[in-house]
Image: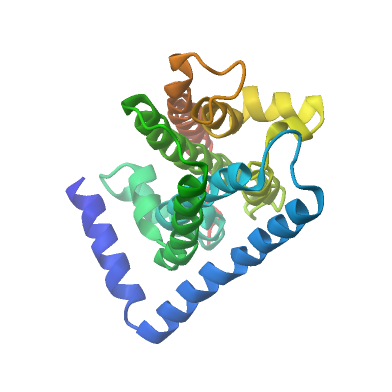
Amino acid sequence: MRLYLHYVKMGIKSQMVYKLSFFLLCIGQFFVPFFVFIGMYLLFDRFENLQGWSFTEVALLYGITHMAFALAEAFVRGFDSFPNLVKSGDFDRLLLRPVSTPLQVLGWKFEFTRIGRLLQGVLIFTWALSKIGLHWTLLKVICISGMLIGGIFIFSGLFIIFATVAFWTIEGLEIANIFTDGGRELSQYPLSIYAKSVRRFFTFVVPFAVVNVVPLSYLLEKPGYQSDLYAFMPYIGVFFIVPALFFWQFGVKHYKSTGS
């Protein structure tokens, strides 16, 4: 943990060398996804609801999804950029150090400019909560915390899985964006609007549904979601990191240097 905190400290120092650039990038990260939110607003202004979900309810999905994605991208950016380490041969140096390779890759690169996207997600989520007026209980606080934590682990697991593929492909695969950026965009809306095959995949394979739509249905006290067990369901997303790390270890064992 001390080593990881040292990595974080060094990452902050390096990115704050050019303070103006850092703050401009933060502003950009705030406003670029904001146009997606405006598009969502225009959609609901035209159709009023989406299969029983109001604009403020979907805004909750939007906010929590962007918060989780921003935190995952900020602190797991090393895995997202990992193919560059393989292609350059720099991963060989990581193997020689007496520190676990996942920790070294985590500390290799951070993207703290994602604080802009995080702030936007927090603002929209807070605004939507104030509009809905939930009846707060301890279980609902636990549920919301789990939605954020579970989302972070799922996005992080996806970054790790597609980083591992680079052991065989050398170059990163654009298909990864279908699951990372695409997963972010998809989970902004209730999964009920998608085809059955899509719902099943993002429930049982990449479990976005169990960290956003299902627990949010419990928070909003929608019919069929009254059981308190739903408050703990988003924590299932934490376990998505386990097969991702096993796959990473499998990839490391089969790694062959590029000779760079």
Residue positioned 40% across, 51% down in the render: 105
Q: Residue furthest left?
A: 2
> Residue 228, located in which quarter of the rendered image?
top left
Can residue 118 be seen in the rendering of this structure?
yes
**Which residue occupies 77% across, 35% down?**
193
Residue at the image position 49 percent from the left and 13 percent from the top: 227
Residue 213 % position (x, y): 59, 32
* Quadrant (top left/top right/bottom left/bottom right) for the N terminus: top left
Point out residue 230 in the picture as x, y percentages from the top left corner: 48, 20
Left or right of 95 in this view: 37: right
Q: Position of residue 159 (x, y in %)?
A: 53, 45
Nearest to the observer: residue 242 or residue 51? 51
Residue 185 locus on image (x, y percent)? 67, 49
| Numbered disc total | 0
Query: Which sits in the foreground, 42 or 182?
Result: 42
Residue placed at 31% from the left, 27% from the top?
138
Nearer to us in this view, 154 or 47: 47
Residue 118, compared with residue 64, is above or below; it is below
Q: Quick check: can you spot residue 70?
A: no
